[in-house]
Image (spheres, grey):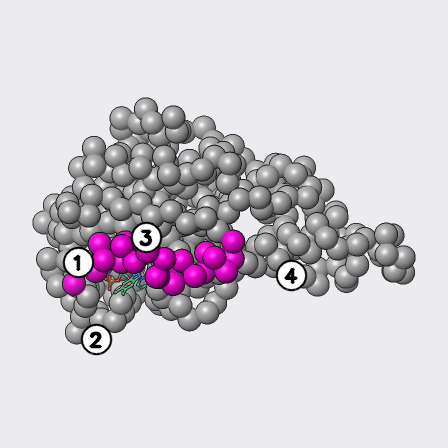
Amino acid sequence: MTILSDLTSLDDIAKLVLPETDQASAAAASERQNSLTKPPGSLGRLEELAMFMAGWQRSEMPVIKKAQALVFAGNHGICAQGVNPFPQEVTVQMVANFKAGGAAINQLCRANGADLSVVALDLDQPTQDFTQGPAMTEAETIKALQSGAAAVDPDASVLILGEMGIGNSTVAAALACATFGGGAAQWVGRGTGSDSDGQALKARVVETGVTLHSAARGMAMLAALGGREQAAICGAVLAARAHSIPVILDGYICTAAVAPLYDTAPALLDHCLVGHASAEPGHKLMVDAMQKAPILSMNMALGEGSGAALALGVLRAALECHNGMATFAQAGVSGG
Ligand SMILES: O=C(O)c1ccc[n+]([C@@H]2O[C@H](COP(=O)([O-])O)[C@@H](O)[C@H]2O)c1
Ligand SMILES: Cc1cc2nc[nH]c2cc1C
């Protein structure tokens, strides 16, 4: 059973009752930070990350016992418009590569201590082309949301999310444009290597889709313009929240995947960090609009959860300092 097992209507997502962060634990962690042997605030974002983890883990001294990484894969009808430089069969081929341990995400999960699972979502059944009609039916969207929720390990201390799906940089741009408005061109980037003509085509396709589905908001927008891996990411984010598990989102595609949740209620993303600032130019616009600050900026635009897995290392370092450092009193250092 997950929080989404009984879901029959996308409208019910807005009615979910979900846990909040524990302010008292975050405040206790903040007090501890100020007692540690360093000038107050000198560990910068590491201090904020420790307090964030304390609030969600409901503990002054939070620990990462188990880090779970999930990569969701889907295929997209929008590829019929020629928006993707790589052929669509690369999605299934990369899933095999993930399973064989040969992709970047496998190495980054090993390096940063995350247990990786890959969930392929009906790859032989791409979504519909969103310039012609809704990408998914409500039933297809619910099924993918439920797959995402079911993949979450309730015992995880933190969840790393990533995706794989040829064509999904166009899907991401459409979700971002529909959520935050503005011209399509500002949301469209190079993806896996589109040239300037390719980018112009992507912008026209996004404009057409967003205009066609302008009445769809929130989770209806996810069905109209999204794909199965985007829906699964939303489902995993909701299931993680139900267990108070903090989430690290990856780059542009992953952040855009949760834009329908933001559009439903921004607080649905309170337990989510953004792992890195993608090289896709629309990512900065989107994280600013969501009032999120990416942990890392590494000029990466791979997807797969790669930037989120890398950020896990920073999160681990933040907790090592928070839990392992001596206080001024313990170390006999003056001035604390
Ligand atoms: O998340 C990102 O920042 C990101 C930016 C550009 C590309 N990607 C990856 O590239 C694929 C989508 O690119 P495209 O050109 O096929 O739309 C998909 O598998 C994503 O994981 C991911
Ligand atoms: C090779 C390749 C690897 C990927 N990983 C995520 N998206 C990808 C797209 C391509 C094309």
Disc 4 residue type (three-letter): Gly
Label 4 vs label 3: CA separation? 37 Å
Task: Report the number of discs.
Answer: 4
Instruction: State yes or no: discs 3 and 2 in contact (Cβ < 8 Å).
Output: no
Choose mark 2 or mark 1, whichever is in front.
1
Q: Amino acid at mark 2?
A: Ser
The residue identified by callout 4 is 44
Residue 125 found in image quarter: top left
Q: Residue furthest bottom?
A: 196
Q: Characterize the local packing of mark 3: few (<14), some (14-19) or many (20 or more) Cα atoms within 10 angstroms.
A: some
- Specify whether 295 is left or right of 201: right
Q: Mark 1, mark 3: which one is toward the viewer?
A: 3
Q: Which one is in front in this view, the residue at disc 4 or the one at disc 3?
A: 3
Residue 317, percent from left and from top: 62, 57
Q: Residue at x 25, y 34 (%)?
A: 143
Residue matched to label 1: 89
Of pointers 1 and 3, the one earlier in the residue sequence: 1
Residue 98 screen position, x and y as percent: 33, 55
Q: Position of residue 85 (x, y in %)?
A: 19, 68
Mark 1 element type: loop
Disc with the residue nearer the chain's start (2 vs 4): 4
Question: What is the CA distance from the residue labelled 1 to the residue labelled 3?
Answer: 16 Å
Q: State which mark lies toward you, 3 or 2.
A: 3
Q: Nearer the viewer, residue 208 or 202?
A: 202
Magenta stretch, residue numbers: 87-113
